[in-house]
Image (cartoon, helix red, strand yellow):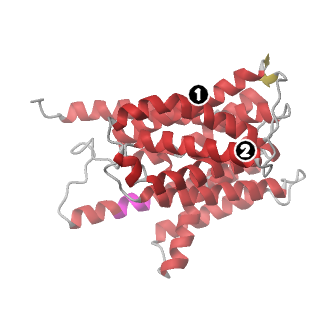
Amino acid sequence: MSAPMTKADAKSFLASGLGIALFSSAVFGTSGSFAKSMLETGWSPGAAVAVRLTGAALILVIPAVVALRGRWHQLKDNWLTILLFGLIGVAGCQLFYFNAVARLSVGVALLLEYLAPVMIVLWLWIASRRRPRALTAAGALLSLGGLVLVLDLTGAVKVDFVGVLWGMAAAVCLVIYFFITAKENDTLPPLVLASGGLLVGAVVMWLVGLLGLLPMTFSTADTTLGPWTTPWWVSAVGLIILATVLAYVTGIMAARSLGSKVASFVSLTEVLFAVIWAWLLLGELPGPIQLLGGLLIVGGVVLVRVDELRGDRRGARGAGQSTSALDHPNDVEPVPSGPATKGPGN
């Protein structure tokens, strides 16, 4: 029987989880840059998504089979969740995000997608007709104000309206993804959900491409990443290995270590990493007004998350439960409900 975890051990466990979460955000943030380098050479968004999902699914299917350990009934019991996750949370979200990246800067496209938590607040407000708490309402308003600045409607450089619609569509898909994964499920390992969703998404993308419903254009032209001119497959491998496989696996590890709520906070750094990668690899950077708007959007999401955590703690105290992460470092949801594995869109 193993010895109980001390507070020092718990702090070390959480510290290592924080490093993993930051690494996950950093590699997730490369997706827009790798994808755009391919789109600029003639790849269609559908083709880039199909290649990304196929490669990642083939790599993750082996550890997913190991995670199942012969319990194949879990797939039968959760087939609808996996199907919806792959169709909307993976294929739809990534396709819309890549379409936005094709028309907007990587940073602006990602900021639009990150409005998903605010959309959830507004939807629940409308559906329940119950006004959100003051901090949540303030966060929503702050993010909406940031959206106005990100669009920079009065600026000299006009933001592509169609690209904005694609970015908002990606946010809607992310909202649906959150609702799909919000239901706690103790039987389906997160890695199985991730690999199953990637596989479903890949099949859907190839199917709609073969039916002619979605342009599937590939290119073998060299891509440009920063000062380097590289073969096309360098960007493709980066998109598959770094931005998908490593990002998903480390995201799951971070959620298990930190808990989905804390991990979702750390995942907000993905916006910062995405902007930095786009600056280094593509030479693009949002304007000062857009950067300010981005800070407001992220700040608004932080306020919403803080209010959510405060509500959870009040509920835990009311039930006479401990609220310290150090007391229960492994007490996490099997499927994160926030953007801890938000990488479906990126």
Please report the residue visible at 76 percent of the width from the left and 44 percent of the height from the top.
210
Label 2 residue SS:
helix
Q: CA distance from mark 2 to mark 1?
A: 17 Å
Q: Was residue 90 drawn as part of the magenta stretch in this picture? A: no
- 135 versus 333 height, above or below: below
Left or right: residue 202 versus residue 188 is: right
Instruction: Say few, some or many: other residues with alpha carbon within 10 Å of mark 2 (under 14 / 14 to 19 / 20 or more).
Output: many
State which quarter of the image contains the N terminus. top left
Left or right: residue 5 versus residue 22 is: left
Which region of the structure is painted magenta? 306-311
Residue under circle 2?
98
Q: Which mark is residue 242?
A: 1
Q: Residue furthest left?
A: 1
In percent of width and height, residue 302 lies at 51, 54
In percent of width and height, residue 266 lies at 48, 42
State which quarter of the image contains the C terminus. top right
In percent of width and height, residue 201 lies at 60, 45
- 104 versus 183 height, above or below: above
Please report the residue visible at 59 percent of the width from the left and 65 percent of the height from the top.
119
